[in-house]
Amino acid sequence: MTETNDLSIKQTVTNMLKLQDQGRRSTLIGIGPMSPNLLEATFELGRDYDFPLMFIASRNQVDKDDLGGGYVNGWNQETFTRDIKKVAKKTGFTGLYYVCRDHGGPWQRDEERNAHLPVDEAMAKAKESYLSDIENGFDLLMIDPTKNPYEMGKVIDMDKNLKWTFDLIQYCENERKKRGLPEIGYEVGTEETNGGLTTTERYETFIQKLKAKLDENGLPMPTFIVGQTGTLTRLGEQVGHWNLKNTLELTTMAKKYGVGLKEHNADYLSDYQLLLHNPANITASNVAPQYGTAETEAYVTLYNVEQRLHKDGLVDDPSNLKPVLIDRAVRTERWRKWMEGDDVNLKVEDVLADDKLKEEILHLGGHYAFNNLDVKREIAKMTKNLEANHIDVHGFVIESIKRPIRQYIQTLNLKGLTTAVRKLGK
């Protein structure tokens, strides 16, 4: 558990469910840690608005070096948690923050899925990753065995999903207890979050079967169960069809079992949709690429300012940031997950020859290249040029990231939530 936490994430969610009965509804934001700047912006907002922070890192973003490491800042579990602590201290944050594993499990690294690893090997790598999570103080582990490459495009086999979910929770709990570590939370799901809707019948069947198996073996119920509310992020926008009636049925059912409903792909939702989250009793919603896009757009704006200053003779040697960022972002190929139709399989060379497509990929996937050395070099050069012209580059980037997060803080009624859950205690 992190140093300032006097409540585990499970205790915080339990208290949020109690607050619902007392007339207070709030929805936590699970924030994808797309960069060190995003950490800083989030901690400052958490400090100023008094709400619990959840940092949700996928295995592609943060993982053991032996398993391939992470594309975000080169973080593994040890350096990720270390840097989070540093930023919390730097910003004077004394509230609740939780380090969370998003989409942990077999085949959750792109290369593992693309290689069609056998089940045993994929499960072994998943356990190795989880063990590092546990040893480095992660507060929540998402158990997600739904990326089976041998069944892609098919309806998830619930019994197979349940078996693997149980096996992984049992493994993680055994390893946690061996080390005498504090309680951690778990997040599980019924199927992939692909923009459809989870049926209430399937949802409850999954919960009932999992609960029976966990109870039988003295294992804890999950903190969150993921349900599909209709959200879907593609091409830098929300293209799903969010459904209030279905969502309310799912949250009511989850609460009956003492767990919170977790929504994925909540990027780019409108104020209208977000304001409906609290009446719907959604406990938490994940947002990631939207905040990476906000940082990318800040860099592009700064680059454009630098170009104008160069044109007017105020910058002698401008950076080449935007072209370099586009090139390196396209070459990561991580943008493919957000594309649709035939664009998913486009060749890198064809993308680089298409000005419109390059701009789209920069918008939705520029953050994939923030840790590239060439990109870092161009950012440093641009920063030096702009600061020589009295422009606060770092401050502008941090504030740009904060803007979309503030929308969620306001609409999801997060202000003062840390104080509210702490008052209820353990």
Image (cartoon, grey):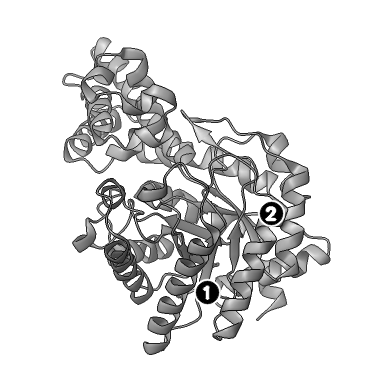
Q: Amino acid at mark 1?
A: Asn
Q: Foreground: 246 or 141?
A: 246
Q: Is residue 2 visible in this depiction of the protein?
A: no
Is 356 placed above or below 117 here? above
**Amino acid at pointer 2:** Ile
- Quadrant of residue 356 within the rendered picture: top left
Reading the image, the residue beneath label 2 is 282
Vertical side of 381 occupied by 254: above or below: below
Q: Report the side of 188 relative to 332 (left or right).
A: right
- When asked about the image quadrant of residue 229, the answer is top right
- What residue do we see at 28% from left, 20% from top? 351
* Front label number (1 vs 2): 2
Please indicate whether residue 415 sits to the left or right of residue 217 in the image. Answer: right
- On-image quarter of the C terminus: bottom right
Q: Residues within 10 Å of mark 2 (few under 14, many from 20)?
A: many
Residue 125: image quadrant is bottom left
In the image, residue 265 lies at what x, y percent? 54, 43
- Residue 52, given in percent of the width and then of the height, sits at 58, 62
Q: Which numbered disc covers residue 5?
A: 1
> In what element is the residue under mark 1?
loop
Report how far apart the C-alphas of labels 1 and 2 lie in the structure: 23 Å
